[in-house]
Image (cartoon, grey):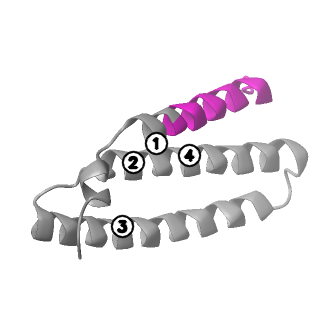
Amino acid sequence: MSEIPLSHILLVSTALFFIGMYGLFTRRNMITMLMSVELILNSVNINFIAFNKYLYPDKLDGVFFTVFIITIAAAEAAVAIAIIINLYRSHQSIDVEDAGEMKF
């Protein structure tokens, strides 16, 4: 069974990171921006796992960091979705530019 080279894993991680950055900077919808942040966090998780596997194969430091990031991302997504739902209920829009003009 052949092993995947580290450079291929880093290429996928880099692609995910820049797709997330593109989505974060070009989209106006808050849900799409939240998904872009999740893509960025997943690219970091791939890096942690890849470097853990290739540099320290008998340790689990990268796995622990990844589990911690997944936990934080789940909490961040729950809070962000709650905020987005409240904004939609009060202003009937989840557009970022409309949120900047809102008066509370």
Q: How many badges with numbers are in the image?
A: 4
Give the residue type that dot 2 points to: Met
Q: Which type of secondary structure does the marked residue at label 2 adopt?
A: helix
**Reading the chain from its start, which is encountered first: label 2 or label 1?**
1
State which region is magenta. 1-21
Q: Nearer the viewer, mark 2 or mark 4?
A: 2
Residue at image point 32% right, 43% down: 28
Main SS of residues in magenta? helix
- Find residue 91 and report its image quarter: bottom left
**Reading the chain from its start, which is encountered first: label 3 or label 4?**
4
Mark 4 vs 1: CB contact within 8 A: yes
Residue beneath disc 4: 40
Give the residue type that dot 1 points to: Leu
Mark 3 vs 4: CB contact within 8 A: no
From the viewer's perspective, tell me whether residue 25 is left or right of residue 50: left
Mark 2 vs 1: CB contact within 8 A: yes
Q: How far from the left and from the top, in percent, is residue 87?
A: 21, 67
Q: CA distance from mark 1 to mark 3?
A: 14 Å
Residue beneath disc 2: 33
Q: Nearer the viewer, mark 4 or mark 1?
A: 1
**Between 37 and 10, the one nearer to me in the picture:** 37
Q: How far from the left and from the top, in percent, is residue 73?
A: 49, 64
